[in-house]
């Protein structure tokens, strides 16, 4: 199928990416510059322009009018590029250390020119390779707490918040989540791609009426709650990290939604590591999970106590009620993410990279079971209980729940 592209839209090439960098006066443009297309994501092209003399670079990201991974039959608005640039700018205003700088954006060409982060590693890749990233989960806890608080009704005036929410209306990217996280993996008639050996485990998900009801409630929450401006795709592939630095990238799925969604996406993607690692490696991920939640809760609580504009902010029980809701939602959304990345679209390298088939199927069966368990029990869980569930489903010395 041939897509009609918006009239002003033109795909960049390495040459035109260099021309743009020069036109913007970036990278001492008198020198000759180099460019590589390095995009390995599902939706965009990414050009890395470098100056070999100064060793400095910039990233130019361009969205195309369809989802690369789904093909031209799944058209997508180019507006997501402006949403991404604006979300980066907004998030950076709350967390300057944790978000790359945007130098330039062009809505017509769907281009964002931003800080080069090539000295860092994608967190998913690093975690798979055994990097420790000791500050990663504290940084992401801080990122979610600040973005969730500062974009909510607890901080913004009601009219201002509604205006921001309008600017971040993102129906096409939300539809990807609604279909591929909350619908297809849970319905037998829309099977995703997965190994035949997982069919029985998949069937037990499709037949579990209690589970499907809970997924329906979570989908409803995703579609209808406007608690805060979310990143919308906060998995470990959307984060660059080193031992000292963390940068959140790729907020093209940004929209106003339930805070637990960002929390849950990050936790689920840590859980893939918790499932696949040996016992001592698991402990390191359990520490990440606990530090993530602790930092989120502490940062959010401090902001609530010092900057909450609601007339009810000091009412006893209100903050615990809000945090408790976020927590229950987070485990529910995390469970959906665990299941969709296993039997739905867009699998993760944490699982698919396991070469031994038997080990891979065992790990995937565990993520399905943990996913279902944390969705159904989400309102009673805390981090130690989630850790216990991971151990029960993955360590031979434990028996399955
Ligand atoms: C069609 S895009 C597939 C997935 O990639 C993105 O990172 C999102 O997670 C989306 O669900
Ligand atoms: Mg992405």
Image (cartoon, helix red, strand yellow):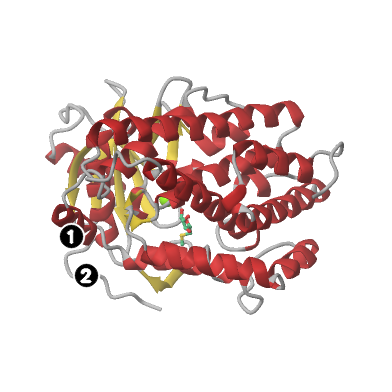
Dot 2 or dot 1: first in sequence order is 2
Q: Is residue 310 left or right of residue 2?
A: left
* Residue 39 vertical placement versus 163 (above, below): above
Asked if one can make out residue 331 in the rendered structure from this viewpoint, the answer is yes
Which image quadrant is residue 384 in?
A: top right
Which image quadrant is residue 287 in?
A: top right
Q: Tag 2's secondary structure?
A: loop
Out of 140 and 113, give the one closest to the viewer: 140
Which label belongs to residue 212?
none
Which image quadrant is residue 343 in?
A: bottom right
In percent of width and height, residue 349 lies at 61, 46
Q: Which residue is mark 2?
A: 6
In percent of width and height, residue 282 lies at 69, 32
Q: Which residue is mark 1?
A: 108
* Residue 25 vertical placement versus 380 (above, below): above
Residue at 25%, 50% (x, y): give it: 153
- The quadrant of the picture occupied by the N terminus is bottom left
In percent of width and height, residue 250 lies at 37, 46
Mark 1 burial class by Cα count in 10 Å: few <14, some 14-19, many 20+: some
Mark 2 burial class by Cα count in 10 Å: few <14, some 14-19, many 20+: few
Disc 2 to disc 1: CB gap under 8 Å: yes
Residue at 12%, 40% (x, y): give it: 23
The span from disc 2 to disc 1 (Cα, nearest Å) is 8 Å
In percent of width and height, residue 100 lies at 30, 34
Q: Is residue 141 left or right of residue 156?
A: right
């Amino acid at each position: 199928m041939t897509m009609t592209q918006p009239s002003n839209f033109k795909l960049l090439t390495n040459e035109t990416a260099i021309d743009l960098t020069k036109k913007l006066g970036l990278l001492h443009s008198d020198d000759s510059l180099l460019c590589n297309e390095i995009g390995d994501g599902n939706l965009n092209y990414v050009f890395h322009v470098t100056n070999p003399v100064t060793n400095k670079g910039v990233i130019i990201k361009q969205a195309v009018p369809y989802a690369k991974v789904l093909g031209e039959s799944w058209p997508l608005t180019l507006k997501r590029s402006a949403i991404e640039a604006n979300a980066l700018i907004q998030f950076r205003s709350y967390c300057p250390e944790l978000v790359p700088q945007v130098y330039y954006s062009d809505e017509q060409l769907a281009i964002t020119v931003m800080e080069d982060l090539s000295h860092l590693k994608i967190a998913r890749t690093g975690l798979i390779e055994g990097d420790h990233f000791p500050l990663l989960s504290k940084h992401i806890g801080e990122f979610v707490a600040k973005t969730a608080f500062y974009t909510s009704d607890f901080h913004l005036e009601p009219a201002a918040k509604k205006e921001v929410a309008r600017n971040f209306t993102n129906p096409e990217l939300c539809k990807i989540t609604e279909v591929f996280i909350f619908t297809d993996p849970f319905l037998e008639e829309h099977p995703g791609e997965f190994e035949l050996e997982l069919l029985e485990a998949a069937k037990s998900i499709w037949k579990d009426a209690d589970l499907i009801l809970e997924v329906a409630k979570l989908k409803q929450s995703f579609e209808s709650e406007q608690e805060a401006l979310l990143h919308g795709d906060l998995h470990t592939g959307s984060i660059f990290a080193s031992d000292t630095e963390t940068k959140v990238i790729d907020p093209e799925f940004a929209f106003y939604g339930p805070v637990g969604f960002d929390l849950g996406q990050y936790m689920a993607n840590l859980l893939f590591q918790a499932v696949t690692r040996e016992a001592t490696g698991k402990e390191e991920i359990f520490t990440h999970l606990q530090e993530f939640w602790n930092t989120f809760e502490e940062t959010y609580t401090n902001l609530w106590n010092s900057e909450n504009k609601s007339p009810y902010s000091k009412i006893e029980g209100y903050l615990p009620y809000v945090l408790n809701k976020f927590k229950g939602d987070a485990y529910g959304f995390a469970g959906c993410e665990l299941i969709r990345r296993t039997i739905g679209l867009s699998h993760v390298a944490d699982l698919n990279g396991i070469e031994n088939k038997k080990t891979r199927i065992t790990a995937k069966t565990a993520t399905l079971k943990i996913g279902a368990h944390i969705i159904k029990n989400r309102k009673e869980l805390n981090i130690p209980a989630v850790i216990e569930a991971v151990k029960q489903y993955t360590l031979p010395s434990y028996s399955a729940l």
